[in-house]
Image (spheres, rainbow, N blue to C red):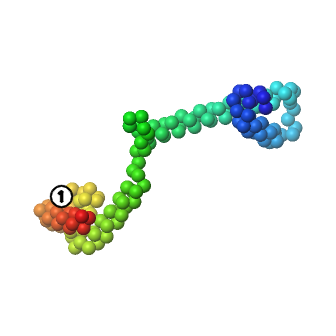
Amino acid sequence: MRFFTVRLGSAAAAEDLVQDIYLKLQSLDPATQVQNEAAFLYRLGTNLMLDRLRQQRRATTRDGDWRAAQISLVQGQEIADEPAADDVVASRQRLAIVLAFLDTLPPAQRRAFRMYKLEGSSQAEVAAALGCSVSSVEKYVRAAMKQLVEKLA
């Protein structure tokens, strides 16, 4: 315990390591011959300790990389790059309103709005799909947008 406590800097970590050594010894084949039992235990413990330290180093690096990708520093303060929970809820509510609104539109207007605004099709592609002119698509989308703005206001 003292040997690993000094190397790990923590009595709790040393206790965990000794438990791991015990488990490793239990899994050994009983027919295994060990010449120097003390040296075997120290080598086994050292290998397990090094494995644990490497694992912690990888986890620290991985967590640091994730943190750097997810959090920005603004004037020394960590700011999450994801929206606040209440903003997410409000956005979902607005989306539900928009989707319910789409069901109230006439079929051609609904399809033109959905294809152009939600699916990202060009007005020419929408016109070809609907079998109408680009001007008609513009009118459908403009009318739907006007009604939607009124609905959301």
Q: How many marks?
A: 1
Residue 144 in view here: no
- Amino acid type indicated by mark 1: Ala
- Across and down, in percent, residue 150 comes to 21, 66
Residue 40 vs 80, above or below: the answer is above
> What residue is rendered at 24% in x and 57% in y?
121
Left or right placement of residue 44 versus residue 122 in this view:
right
The answer to whether residue 29 is left or right of residue 9 is right
Left or right, 65 with respect to 83, comes to right
For the N terminus, give its image quadrant.
top right
**x and y percent of residue 29 in the render?**
83, 40
Where on the picture, by quarter, is residue 81?
A: top left
- How far from the left and from the top, in percent, is residue 20? 75, 39
Residue 129 x/y as whole percent = 22, 64
Q: Residue at x 22, y 73 (%)?
A: 106
Q: Quadrant of the C terminus?
A: bottom left
- Choose between 96 and 6: the one closer to the eye: 6
On the image, numbered disc 1 is attached to which residue? Answer: 124
Disc 1: CA contacts within 10 A as few (<14), some (14-19) or many (>=20): some
Query: Residue at 77% across / 27% down in the picture?
Result: 3
The reply to whether residue 70 is in sight is yes
